[in-house]
Image (cartoon, grey):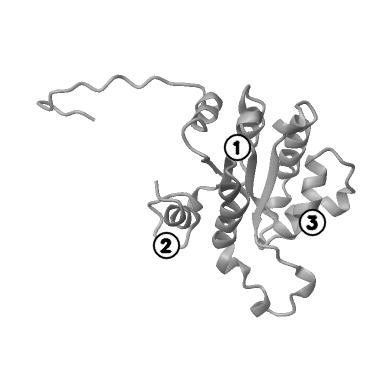
Amino acid sequence: MCFAGCGTIEPPLTPRPAAEYITEAFDRYPLVALSEMHGNAESKDFFARLIRHPGFAGTVNDIVIEFGNARYQDVVDRYIGGEAVDRNVLRGTWEDTTQISGIWSLPMYEEMLADVRAVNLTVPGDRRLRVLLGDPPLDWTQVTSPADDDMNDWRDAHFAWVVATHVRATRRKALIFVGGGHISRTVVFPNSLIHLLDARFPG
């Protein structure tokens, strides 16, 4: 922003389609985060348009999501890859997470996985998207007391580990789809996802 007397004039802002802008951002950055408003249908609709945008598949390798229990990674890999997966098994992905509010049980989250699967069925194997599950691998069958359910304390740490291990270490590119509180640098929470990634990958 330029004030009177600064000597330069900033060019006017030019609106651009969001899907195009985000896709092109991967030309400059290996990680691009998209803030999700949990339960918001517009978030789901935009996600569906984004992954179908020309050039997204083939440029982006992975999508790291908050609404999936990492214990089900092999199940989601098979489903996203086009295999037949029993829904009663697949649903554990979004139902058995650390979040007991039930927010992930909204139909939109299952539909988002189905959208990625549908895209993958239309592109060659080397352009297929992988969905990485960012929530810790909690096994509710082993939880017998509140002390056992301590994974909420390291949700962001596990998400950051997934990004570091499965994306950055293999030089892949990923869209991070997560609630805004995890990727806002103004949030006073030093162990949130954005601060952990900033520390591991400066710049």
Task: Tell me which amino acid carries mark 3.
Answer: Gly
Q: Are marks 1 and 3 in contact (CB under 8 Å)?
A: no
Q: Secondary structure at mark 2?
A: loop
Residue 104 is left or right of residue 118, and the answer is left
Label 3 crowd (10 A; few <14 / some 14-19 / many >=20): some
Residue 128 falls in image quadrant: top right
Mark with earlier residue (1, 3): 1
Decide: is 53 above or below 190.
Answer: above
In the rendering, at what x and y percent does residue 17 appear?
51, 22
Foreground label between 1 and 3: 3
The label shown at residue 43 is 1
Q: Earlier in the sequence, mark 1 or mark 2?
A: 1
Query: Please, what is the three-letter code of the amino acid marked with disc 2?
Result: Pro
- 33 and 44: which one is in front? 33
Of tags 1 and 2, the one toward the viewer is: 2
Q: Confirm or deny contact between disc 1 and disc 2 (CB under 8 A).
A: no
Image point 67% across, 31% down: which residue?
A: 48
x, y (%) of residue 23? 55, 29
Q: Amino acid at mark 1?
A: Ser
Q: Is residue 161 left or right of residue 114?
A: left
Above or below: residue 144 compared with residue 198: below
Tell me, for residue 190, which label it has, or none: 2
The secondary element bearing badge 1 is classed as: helix
Res 92 label? 3
Rendering coords of residue 196 (x, y %): 47, 58
Task: Please say if 138 is above or below 32.
Answer: below
Which of the 4 image quadrants contains residue 5?
top left
Percent position of residue 177, x then y: 59, 44
| Front residue of 121 and 45 | 121
Q: Quadrant of residue 57?
A: top right
